[in-house]
Image (cartoon, grey):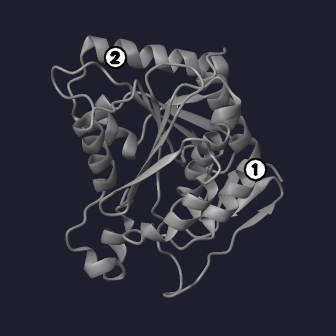
Amino acid sequence: MSEVVELIRRVAAVPSFSSYEERLHPLIREILADVPGAQIEVVPENNLLVSIPGTVPGPPIAMAAHLDKIDHYVEGIPALHVDVRDGKIVGPMDDSAGLGICLAIARQASKHPFPPLLLLLSEMEESFGFERHPQRLKNGGFGREPGQGAERLSRRLLATGRTPSAVITLDTTPLFKGISGRALYCAPWELNGVEASGELRDATAELRDRLLAIDPDLLVANNTNDYLTYGAELNLPGRPPIPSVALEPSIFPYHRANEEVFVEDILRLEQVLVTFLSGRR
């Protein structure tokens, strides 16, 4: 079993439901413990900001994933069932798939000519709990809102002067409806209400084209997730443009138990990121 698949399997087993994302923190610390120079910072409440030095100079590139899973399960369950079969990983894949890819790339950072990396690992990306069973959230969801993790991480980056040159969010896409595929979301201003400058559009188009040169089979599309928040929060008026895109493997069923992602899509996205971060085409 490849390392990235094993990481996804381990991440998926943890019942880190919305508002309980801290349950994943010990595993993430364990996985990153032998990554040279990795520094992990908790951004209240349950977000993690990971800094990893690069092997080549340059501004950092951020990879983002959300820590929370949707709670479809029996209350108090100690671990979630995950299986790898028939070329698929089956279990709570949203967003175990994205988080596992981020961690796999982080573990390779010292082995490739990568720039510095930032991992933005966010709480409360999902709105499902508020809509279906808010009583399962801590304190009934009081003081929490969907997307707050990406907002808090963005503001920490701005406040500490650690803005990346780009943000690539790793999540899962329902657009393929059960067949293998990978999507590239690259127009956050269509959905987040930001008035995108020409500079931001040009920088995003350049990033889009670099990723498509590596994987021409990426489906250019759009949908809602934390990539919209990073695109809005990091592109305040008067600041240099920071393109925000998302790379997403196919998932089916979506927002239900026993979600499936294709191993081939996971391995392909891992390779796309290694190639991109290494500056190769």
What percent of the width, then of the height, locates residue 248? 56, 41
Which residue was labeled with disc 1?
A: 3
Upstream in sequence: badge 1 or badge 2: 1
- Quarter containing the C terminus: top right
Residue 36, visible in the rendered structure: yes
Number of marks in picture = 2
**Which residue is tagged 2?**
201
Asked if residue 77 is positioned above or below residue 272 in the image, the reply reads: below
Residue 212 in which image quadrant: top right
Residue at point 64%, 21% (across, down): 278
Residue 110, percent across and down?
66, 34
Q: Quadrant of the N terminus?
A: bottom right
The structure residue drawn at horizontal position 33% and vertical position 38%, both measured from the top left corner, is 230
User: What is the distance, in whole Å, between disc 1 and disc 2 at their CAs?
Assistant: 35 Å
Q: Residues within 10 Å of mark 1 (few under 14, many from 20)?
A: some
Q: Is residue 224 visible?
A: no
What amino acid is labelled 1 in the image? Glu
Instruction: Name the mark nearer the viewer: 1 or 2.
Output: 1
Name the image quarter holding residue 158.
top left
Position of 185 with respect to 134 (left or right) is right
Instruction: Give 206 or 21, whichever is nearer the viewer.
Output: 21
SS class of the residue under badge 2?
A: helix
